[in-house]
């Protein structure tokens, strides 16, 4: 089919550029998807700046983009499941490695999940390949730009809330960082019945957005009196989510937990985790839990909720950028220009 535009990251030296590459052909069990929308995530920024590095990438470079939606363009041999050309789909953000003991013996959970746009080519391109088991069919009334963000920006906080944290209805929860992950966390906490919901962010527009999305109260993380105010307003939290990946957030959030409270680390950072006074952590039996991605079936569940109009992500789309200008979209996210939730690349 000739060539196409793709946003390629070379690892050594670290360099990102949009350039022409060959259009890929689907292999056994794969489909080729004509990309209609691809999200720009802070993880993409971290890959470009070098603070994140692929663990399972086979070559020296990769096409970025793990939030992808489009239309099946071609099927390779032996594609299971009745998939057809022309179907609207979103793509899971990763796939099983197919080699580890859990894949071979149990299928789930994989011990070496390969992430799209990190460990193999993703969707910052005109066309993307996908294994059939990573496809999720879309309802006709769900726009591609909203569908594209579900496999990470929505499903990651959903997995943290319903899986890792096991949030209970009527119990208090806090969200630190109301950006691409945190804004959806507020919505999803509202959906599962957490109450009250506390949002914490240093940016006033982000705090205002949190209240619009369903938070009961919003605090400035730079307020030296934050912990006292939070306890006075809501009482101790059952669970606090670090959606920002900022070390200072974690120490502040853990102070706001009650007996048995959980701090869930969702935002990624290579910086060390430090809690200077760990006696309250032990005495009150607080927990610090890591979280990454989402669980089996989570994307399908969220698409189903959208199909039944229980969730609306139209407010999450902060702008559309041509694929050729992907570097500009990355810079806008770095600068927090317009306080974005998700910028969307369009080929």
Image (cartoon, helix red, strand yellow):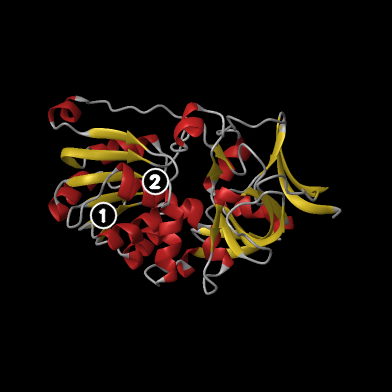
Residue 202 appearing in the image: no
Q: Is residue 312 above or below residue 291?
A: below
Q: Is residue 62 above or below residue 306?
A: above
The quadrant holding residue 140 is bottom right
Query: Looking at the image, which residue is at 22% across and 26% down?
Result: 277
Indicate the quadrant containing the C terminus: top left, top right, bottom left or bottom right: bottom right
Neighbourhood count class around disc 2 (C-alpha, 10 Å): few under 14, some 14–19, many 20 upward: many
Q: CA distance from mark 2 to mark 1?
A: 13 Å
Q: Of helix, strand and loop, which one carries label 2?
A: loop
Residue at image coords 56%, 49%: 133
Q: In x, y percent, where is residue 180?
A: 46, 54
Count of marks overlaid on the render? 2
In this picture, residue 139 sits left or right of residue 191: right
Residue nearest the viewer, comparing 325 with 221: 325
Q: Is residue 319 left or right of residue 258?
A: right
Label ID, residue 111: none
Left or right position of 268 against 221: right
**The N terminus sits in image quarter:** bottom right
Residue 341, x across and y down, in percent: 48, 58
Residue 257, visible in the rendered structure: yes
Image position, residue 158 (x, y; %)? 37, 52
Q: Is residue 57 left or right of residue 259?
A: right
Q: Which residue is mark 2?
A: 243
Check disc 1: other Cα within 10 Å, few if <14, some if 14-19, many if 20+. Answer: many
Residue bearing the label numbered 1 = 198
- First in sequence, mark 2 or 1: give its number: 1
């Amino acid at each position: 089919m000739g060539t196409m535009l793709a946003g390629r990251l070379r690892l050594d030296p670290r360099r990102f550029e949009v350039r022409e590459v060959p259009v890929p052909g689907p292999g056994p069990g794969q489909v080729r998807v004509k990309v209609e929308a691809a999200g720009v995530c802070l993880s993409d920024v971290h890959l470009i700046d070098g603070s994140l590095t692929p663990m399972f990438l086979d070559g020296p470079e990769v096409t970025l983009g793990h939030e992808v939606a489009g239309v099946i363009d071609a099927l390779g041999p032996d594609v299971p499941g009745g998939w057809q050309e022309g179907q609207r789909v979103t793509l899971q953000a990763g796939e099983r490695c197919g080699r580890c003991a859990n894949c071979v013996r149990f299928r789930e959970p994989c011990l070496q999940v390969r992430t799209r746009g990190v460990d193999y080519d993703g969707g910052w391109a005109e066309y993307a390949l996908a294994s059939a088991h990573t496809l999720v069919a879309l309802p006709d009334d769900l726009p591609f730009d909203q569908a594209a963000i579900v496999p990470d920006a929505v499903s990651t906080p959903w997995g943290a809330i319903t899986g890792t944290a096991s949030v209970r209805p009527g119990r208090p929860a806090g969200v630190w960082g109301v950006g691409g992950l945190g804004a959806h966390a507020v919505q999803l906490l509202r959906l599962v019945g957490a109450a009250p919901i506390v949002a914490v962010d240093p940016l006033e527009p982000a705090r205002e957005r949190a209240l619009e999305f369903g938070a009961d109260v919003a605090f400035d993380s730079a307020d030296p009196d934050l912990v006292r105010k939070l306890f006075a307003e809501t009482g101790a939290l059952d669970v606090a989510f670090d959606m920002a990946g900022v070390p200072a957030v974690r120490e502040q959030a853990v102070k706001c937990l009650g007996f048995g409270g959980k701090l869930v680390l969702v935002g990624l950072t290579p910086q060390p985790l430090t809690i200077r006074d760990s006696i309250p952590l032990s005495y009150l039996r607080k927990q610090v839990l890591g979280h990454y991605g989402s669980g089996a079936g989570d994307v399908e569940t969220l698409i189903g909720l959208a199909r039944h109009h229980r969730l609306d992500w139209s407010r999450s789309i902060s702008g559309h950028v041509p694929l050729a200008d992907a570097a500009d979209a990355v810079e806008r996210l770095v600068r927090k220009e317009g306080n974005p939730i998700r910028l969307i690349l369009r080929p």
